Image (cartoon, grey):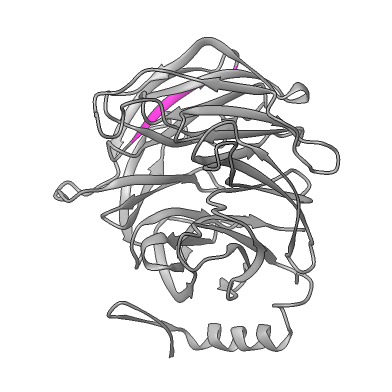
Amino acid sequence: MKRIAEHGSSTYSLPMNLEIRLVLLILMGVATTGSLAGESLVYFGTATSGHSRGIYVSRFDDSSGILSAPELAAEVRNPMFLAVAPGNRFLYATGEMEGADGKRAGAVNAFARDAQTGRLTWINRQSSGGSGPCHLAVDATGQCLLVANYGSGSIAALPVRADGSLGEAATLFSRSGSGPNPKRQAGPHAHFILPSPDNRFTLDCDLGLDKVFISHLDPAAARLTAADPPFAPLAPGSGPRHLTFSRDGRFIYVINEMGGTISVFSYAATNASLTAVQTISTLPKDFATNNTAAEIVLHPNGRFLYGSNRGHDSIAVFAVDTATGRLALVEHASTLGRTPRHFALDPSGRWLLAENQGSDSVVVFAVDGDTGKLKPTGQVQPLVSPTCAVFVNEK
């Protein structure tokens, strides 16, 4: 085994068989040629306040778990979150632009993808309809881009044209109110928005108001209208951040940034109403240091759920009771870095990439399909301030 990377005082090693595979892939020129069988492209969003220049791309081999060194795919300011449209032709990124007052304003950027090289060609930019855009998603038809603006607490829906370009926002919701934490919840803070599995509704998490809002979705018109009921409340001070659906769509899992918990709801597809089932901590019982929960991802097999902790710097692994939706803790796995703002499972579910924003690294873990547990592979790719990862598989 040979040393391939250092992180702090720790040294990571790569097993010899993976090292040989890596050398072979390099010799085959995977950094500059088209995708191989079993290979995905991975796009990384970053915060560009440091030395990062925008969106980066790597190649990932799902048979070996080898991740190539990230290369610049497009230079753009603060592409903190990314989304790929159905069909994989276009990629969208949150960002910034200069407002009418000369100050920075929220923006969303559209890019065309080169499936062979992974490079991105900028198409156009539109206002996100608020400040601090932090999350976006494309509806299942590819006609509508949904954006959550953390700073202004607003959500927007933008039409997507046939060439992938974005039109001006057709819907903009601005909300009011506050939560019990005066520092974090003085006003609304939209943090996430996602279409329902049947594409009839959207659900968006507002950290400042402790609510998951529900809206009817008309993707062809990029129109959102409040549903009935219009929201589901969470415990005061929870700070809902992101959510995901169960594999069968019967349950929703909400990770609460401030509370360090995951809230489980049953989901009625007829009207998108939510009914509370369970709330479980993302932290060990004896952990008392500051922590904020971040990303939440369901394993493709539907049996395991993962949530990241920033402070404890770990990924909490839960087993899912698919009949009741309830969660049971499996383990806390260190991300071998600081501030795992985001992580992603590859399409096969065999590998997990943890993006440590605070230590400028992407760490590759193997996923045990029987237990859900994570095991570091020894791979650590340097990347300045990673904030998002999106897999694209052309197969």
Viewed as shown, does residue 121 lie left or right of 225?
A: right
Residue at 55% x, 28% y: name it: 155
Q: Does the segment drawn in magenta span residue 368? A: no
Q: Residue 332: where, in percent of width, then height? A: 30, 55
Camera sees residue 30: yes
Residue at 30% x, 45% y: name it: 292
Q: Residue 342: where, in percent of width, then height? A: 45, 53
Q: In this view, does 168 lie above or below 352?
A: above
Viewed as shown, does residue 334 lie left or right of 91?
A: left
Question: What range of the chain is rendered magenta?
Answer: 262-269
Q: In this view, does 164 lie above or below 351?
A: above
Q: Nearer the viewer, residue 90 or 96?
A: 96
Q: In this view, does 384 lie above or below 248?
A: below
Count of numbered circles in the view: 0
Residue at 32% x, 57% y: name it: 314
Quarter of image, res 272: top right
Q: Residue 121: where, in percent of width, then height? A: 77, 58
Quarter of image, res 216: top right
Magenta span: predominant SS is strand
Q: Is residue 196 above or below residue 216?
A: below
Quadrant of the drawing holding the C terminus: bottom right
Q: Which of 74 and 365 is in front in this view?
A: 74
